[in-house]
Image (cartoon, rainbow, N blue to C red):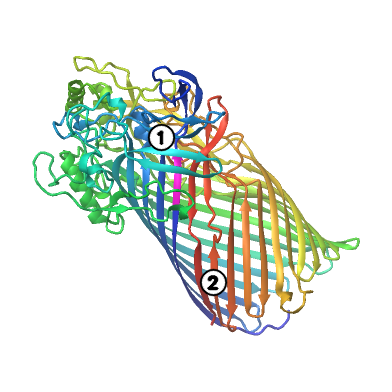
Amino acid sequence: MGHRHRRDRLLASVSYSQLYSRADRLGISSFRVRPIYSNGTRTDTLPFAGATQTGEGLFPRGAVMGSQEFDRERYGYSAAAQWRSHDGSMEATAQFLRSDARQAWLENTIEIATDNVQSNGDSRARAGTSLDFDDSGLFQSGVITGPTGWRADQNTAGNIRTPIMGLQSNNIRREQLEKIVTSDYSFNFKWDVSDRLAVNLDYQHIVSSSKITANTLWISTYQDAAIKLNGSDLPEVRFLPPQNCESANFNIATGSCNGTPGTAAYPSYYTGTHQSYLDPYNSFPRAAMDHVEDSDGNSDAARIDLEYQFPEGGFLKSLRAGVRYADRDTTARFSTYNWGRLSEQWGNGGPVWLDDPVNGSPTTGGGAPLTQYQPVFFDNFLGGQTNNPVAGQGRLFYSGRPSTDYDAYANYANQIINEWVPKITCALDGRSINDGWNRLSERCGVIPGTNYLPGEINPQSETNKAAYLMARFDTGLGGAKLSGNVGLRYTSTRRQSAGFQSFPVVTTIPSQADCADAIQDILTNGSGALQAFCAVPQSVRTSASNFLNGALVPNDVDVTYDYWLPSLNLKLEAGDGLQFRFAYTKGIAPPSPGLVRNYYVVSLAAQPNTDANGQALPIVINPDGTVPAGQARVEGQFNAGNPYLKPVSADSFDLTAEWYFNRVGSFTASAFYKRLHNVLTNDIQRQTFTNNGESFDSIVTTPVNSSQTGEIKGIEVAYQQTYDFLPSFLKGLGLAANYTYIQSSGVPQAILNPTDPAVSSGQQPTITGADFPLQGLSKHQFNITPFIDIGPLSLRATYNWRSDYLLTLRDVITPFDPIFQRAYGQLDASAFLTVNRNFKIGVQGVNLTKSTTITEAAVADQDGNVRRVPRQWYSPDRRFSIITRYTF
C-alpha cells in the first residue's frame, strides 16, 4: 500500500437563488359527441325549425384563460469535515446538507363552469348564429352559449337580474405558498484493513417537512364564447356579454322582451348603465376553497460494505458484499380541497352580487357592499401570439391574497355566505357553522385546534432490509480485454399505514322546505330548472344525511414485499478507442408517497338523468308540485389512495458501442429494451358503501398495479467533439448532440361499463388507453449543444426537442380524459466568465424561443374511435438568471 499524506479538511458552502416568472394559458374545454342539426344555412347542436339531424360531431362546452406569476426562492447550506489517519488506511467524513425551497404563485383564471353548462342543458349556438364543423365532425368555429338553469331571483319582483342564457363563468383567484425543508446528516467511514480487505460504513439521517397552503376564491359572471380553432396554431377566443333585451340581436330564447328591466322576461343583467364587466352589478362571489398540507418525516439508513481483492493475474478481481437497513416514518397531514358555496343563482333569492349591501344576515337589511375586488385585464396575454379574450374589458377578481392573508380571505368569504344563508348546527358537536363553505379549522368534525379531519392525517412507516453480493472480474480475450461484474441483491420492505374510511358531514343537501320553495317558484313563473337533489324523495335526502354522519371506520394496513434483483455488466475493450458494453439489471421503483396515502373519503352528490347524447334532462314537476320519481340519482365520485401499492419493477437490457476517435471526441450508439411489471395505472369501480344503516353507490378511482406488462425499446446515438485542430481561439469550439428513438407500449386504465350513467353523462372517460405509449415517453427526442471555451469565457447554447407524448391517462378534472402533449422544443443558453480560481460569474437564459406548450385530450368520437382534440396552450416566460460562484 502506497504512503498517503494525511489531509484533514473543513468545507462549507452557502447558495441562494430567486426566480420570477409568468405563464399564460388558453384552453378549449370538454369536447363531447353531440348531434348536429342543419337547415342548409344554419347549424346547431339542438333541433330548430326546419332543421334535420345531419350527423354527430365533437363540440366543446366552453373555454378558459389564465395567467400565473411565480416567485421561487431557494436556500442551500452545506458543511463537511474530513479526517484521514497518518498511514492513510482510515478515512472519515461527516457531512451536513440543508435545502430550503420556497415557492409562491398567484393565478387569475377565467373559466367557463362546464359542469354547470352540462347540467343546465349544455352548450349550443348563440341565437341567430351558426356553428361550423369540419368534414370529420370536429367543431371549428362559432359563438356558443347555454341556458343558465334555475334562477332563484326570478320570483323577486323588480330585481330579476340573472340572465336566462349565458355560460356561467368563474373569475378564479388562487394563491399557493409552499415551503419544503430537508436536512441531511451523514457519516462515512472507510478502513483498509489490509491490502486486500476494505470496509465501508455509512449512516444517514434525514429530516424533512412540507408546508403548503393553497386557497381559492371564485367570482362568477355570465358570458358567451366566440371560439375559432386554427389547426396547429393558437385558437382565437372572445368572451362576449350574453344576449339580452338590449342587445342588437336579443336572446330569442326568451320569446320576446316584455315589461321593464328586472322582470322575468327582461333580466337586468348587463343592461342599462351596467353594460360593463367592471361594474360590480354583473358579478357575484360564488365559492371558496382552502387546502393545507403540513407533513413531516424522517428516515435513518445504514449500510456496511466489505470488499476483498484477489491477487492480480486471476480472472476474479474482487468480491463485494453488503447489507442495508432503512427506516422511514412519515405523517401526511393533507386536507381535502375544501370547496364550498358562498352564494349561488339557484337559492335564497339569487346570489349576493358585488354591489349588494352586506351585513352578515340574510334576514335583515342594511350594510354596505364589500369592496374587496379589483379588475384584471391580462395585459400582453400570451405575448400577443393571439387575441386577448377580454381585450378592453377585463374582469373583476377578489383583490386579496387568499393564502398570504388567510384570515382576511376567510372573513370575506364568511361575510358573503352569512349574508346568503343562515347558519346551521354541526350534528357532531353542536357548533354553529356555515351552510356551505367553512374554513378548514371550522368544519364539522374537525380535530380541535387543527385544520384536519381525522381521516386527513395519515401516519406511515416503512422498513427496508437488503443484502447483496457482487463479483468483479476481467480477463484478456485475444487482443481485447473483457471486464465486468455480476451481482445479486435481496430486498424486503414492510409498509405500515394508519387511516380511515370516512363519511364526512356535508351541508349541501337541501331540506324539504328548500325544495318546496324552489318548486313553488318554478310553478309560479313557469320557467327554471330544479336542482337534482330536489328530484329525489325526501326519504333519500334523509338517508344521504344519515349516511354522511362523520363516521370513521379504521382501515390500518400492513403490507410486505420482497424482491431478488440480479445484475450483469460487461465491457469489451477492442482497441483503437473502440469498446462495447452489455448490461442486464432488474430494478424496482417504489410508488410516490402521495399515491400510498391511506385515505378513503366517501362523498355523495345528486346527478340528473341524461339523454342519449349525455345532456342533462330537465326535472319535470307535476302541476300539484310533486316531482315524479326516477329523474335523478344520488351517488358519490371520489379518489382514494392505495396503501397496498407495490413498486414498479423492470428487466432492463442495454447494448452500447463507444468509439473514442481522439482525445476530445467520441461517438456512441446504444440499443435498449425494458419490460415493466406492476406498472401504475387507474382502477375505476362502482362500489356500494354502507354506513349508519344506509347504502349508496360511489364511483371510486384509485391507483393500482397493472397485471399487464409494459415495454420500452429503442436506440440512442450521441456525438461529442472539441475541434482542437482549428486555429487560434477556435480551438475551444465544440459540439455535443444526441438522438433517441423509443417505442413503448403502456397498460390500460379501467373504465366503467359504457352503459353506466356516469359514462353516458360524460362524467367518466370511455378510453382505456390500451394502445397508448407509456406516460412521459416521446418516440423521438434530440438535443444539440454548440459550445466554445475561450480562455476564461465559456459559452453554451442548447436546443432540446421531443415529439408528442402521453402526460397522463386520467386528467384531474371532469371529464377525466387522457392528456397528451404535442411536440415541443426550446432553446437555452449560458455564458460564464472565470475571474480567478475562486470566483465565477455568468448568466443563463431558459426558453429563449418563448416556446408554447400545447396539450390535447384523447376522446372517443362519434364512430367510437380515439381522437385528439385541442385542450390548452401554455406560454411560459423567458427566464434569465445571474449566477455567481465563489469557492473558498
As measured in the structure, the alpha-carbon distance from the residue carrying label 1 to the one carrying label 2 is 47 Å
**Place of residue 623 in the rendered image (x, y in percent of width and height, measured from the top left):** 21, 14
Q: Which residue is mark 2?
A: 843
Label 1, secondary structure: give it. strand
Dot 2 amino acid type: Val
The reply, left or right, for residue 103 in relation to residue 244 is: right
Q: Main secondary structure of the magenta part?
A: strand
The reply, left or right, for residue 488 in relation to residue 161 is: right
The numbered mark at residue 143 is: 1
Q: Could you say which is closer to the camera, residue 95 or residue 49? A: 49
**Mark 1 neighbour density, 10 Å: few (under 14) some (14–19) many (20 or more):** many
Mark 1 or 2 closer to N-term?
Answer: 1
**Place of residue 4 in the rendered image (x, y in percent of width and height, measured from the top left):** 68, 83
On screen, residue 620 above or below 875: above
Residue farthest toward the front in the current orientation of the protein: 248
On screen, residue 191 above or below 818: below
Dot 1 amino acid type: Val
Magenta segment, which residues?
A: 24-28
- The residue lying at 24 percent from left, 47 percent from top is 279
